[in-house]
Every structure is written in C-alpha cells, then in structure tokens.
Image (spheres, rainbow, N blue to C red):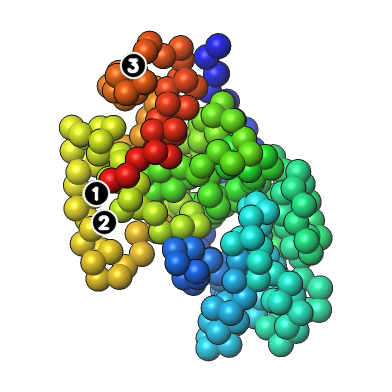
Amino acid sequence: MSLAAPPTTDWPLPAVRPLTVRCVPAFSDNYLWLIHGQAEAASQVVAVDPGDATPLLRVLDEHQLRLAAILVTHHHADHIGGMARLLATPSVLTSPSIPVFGPAKEQIPGRTHAVGAKDRVDLPRLGLHFEVLDVPGHTAGHVAYAGHGALFCGDTLFSGGCGRLFEGTAAQMLHSLDCIAHLPSTTQVYCAHEYTAANLRFAQVVEPHNQALSDYAREVDARRAIGEATIPTTLARELAINPFLRTRDRRIQAIAAAHAGRALIDEVDTFAVIRQWKNEFRG
C-alpha cells in the first residue's frame, strides 16, 4: 500500500531570526552543534547531541561560553556519550540543573524533558524556540528540532543520504523524510555526520544524469580537499540531489526496479531497495 504524504506543517514555526551555530568536530566524522543564544545571551549555548565531552569542553573554555541546555535526537552513544561529564562540570553550566530535552520514546540518561511530535522547546532567556518532529527510522524514537530557519536532525537526513534503519522500517523513514521535506525549502539542515562525499558517490549511481548532483559533487570534493565541512546543507539542495528524498521520481523508481530485478510495489518499496543498495554499495 502506498504511503500517504504527511500533511503540511500545521503548527507555527517560530519567527526566523538567524542562528549562530558553532560546529564542533568529534570522533572520526561526527559534528556536535552549539547554538548560541540571541543578542545579549550570545555567550550562552545549547548543545545538540553531545556525544563527546572533550571537544565541547575545550570550545566552551576557549570561547568563554556557558552551556544553558542540551537537545538530544536519539539514544546512540555518539550522540549522548559526553552528556554525563558535561553535566558534572559546573564551571561550564549556566546553572546547576540545565534542561536536557530528549525523545520520549527512548531511554536518555539525564533527560529532564521528554519530547515528541509537536512539542515545543522554549528557551526564552536565550531567545530560542524549537518545534519537535517525530522522525523514526534510524531509531524507533528519533526526534528532530526545527526553528529559526534551521533543522537539527541527528542521523535521519544527511546531505545526499539518510540514516541506516537500525530500529525502524522503510515506511517509517520515508514518512519521516516526507515530514522534513514539508519544511520551508530555505531550511538550513544540521545533521550529525560528515558523510556527504560518500553519499554523493552513491547518489550519482542512482541518478547519473542529475546535473545539480554532479555540480554539487564537484563542490563537495573541493571543499573536503581543504578540510571544509559540507554541513549545514539546505533543504532545497537536498530536494534536488538526495535520492532518498526523490523516491517518487520515475527515473529513480526505474533504476531501483532495474537494480532489484523486479517490478516495485510503491514508493516504500522503492525506498527500501535504494536503502539496501546503499548499505551494500562500495564506491
């Protein structure tokens, strides 16, 4: 059965005030994000998916920043592993008990606020407000945070790709990506890994004649050659080049069917074939 596209967003996104977001590389390819407060609260930050405390503590100390809240998208260790140490370092906190927001459907140690679809994260002292989206697929209870023209989506959407289905189904992930696709096309997408170059090598196999994809691949190769991050990306760009957001395109459906060697049932089947193909791809 075909999966119906989700309705357009029916909750009001906060007024767009551009965010200042600091990228903190961790492990081999993770990006941890620090969101600065607005105006006079600019020295206070919100950490997103603090998987490693060491680089975060270094950045907080070097730039004289204080941690005011934590947003968690899912329970994997590379997203929560540094949280206990951060919370046990009072010198970097704005108060002894900062709020920790995390998915209600997952076990998140240290979480103070369990959140799910259409909940709001309101941090008025920082001038920050985010809406919560349920985006299961990579994990069963994965959430994302949208606001101020930005999306912090953990391991759901990557530039040129999407997360592996460790706990969810293809139908769930496709629906999650559809929910993201209904955000404004200008949305800045902050995902949690630098996977872009590898993702685009696969995407070009799926869509060899996509000129926007070819152009972007050249840009990414040049940026990575000098050590630049490719994140954030924009939703508009991803809608043009990311095969996992384009599974209703007839050309992608045709190449997926050819790869599978059979007729495909619907867009969920198309997505599942492409996701498994990506899992096995060595390019």
Residue placed at 68% from the left, 54% from the top? 75
Secondary structure at numbered mark 3: loop
| Three-letter code for the amino acid on which mark 3 is drawn | Gly
Q: Where is residue 147 in the image (x, y as percent from the top left)?
A: 57, 52
Q: Where is residue 50 in the image (x, y as percent from the top left)?
A: 61, 67
To which residue does mark 3 refer? 261
Residue placed at 20% from the left, 43% from the top? 214
Contact (CB < 8 A) between labels 1 and 3? no
To which residue does mark 1 refer? 216
Quarter of the view holding residue 43: bottom right
Contact (CB < 8 A) between labels 1 and 2? yes
Q: How many labels does the image show?
A: 3
Secondary structure at numbered mark 2: helix
Q: Distance between the residues labelled 1 and 2?
A: 6 Å
| Sequence-wise first label, 3 or 2 | 2
Residue placed at 50% from the left, 70% from the top? 26
Q: Can residue 254 be seen in this view?
A: yes
Residue placed at 41% from the left, 14% from the top? 264
Position of the N terminus, as image quadrant, is: top right
Q: Residues within 10 Å of mark 3 (few under 14, many from 20)?
A: few
To which residue does mark 2 refer? 220
Secondary structure at numbered mark 1: helix
Q: How far apart are marks 1 and 3 (CA)?
A: 30 Å
Q: Is residue 236 visible?
A: no
- Which of pointers 1 and 3 indicates the residue nearer the eye? 3
Q: Residues within 10 Å of mark 2 (few under 14, many from 20)?
A: some
Up/down of 28 relative to 254, above or below: below
| Three-letter code for the amino acid on which mark 2 is drawn | Val
Q: Where is residue 161 in the image (x, y as percent from the top left)?
A: 41, 43
| Sequence-wise first label, 1 or 3 | 1
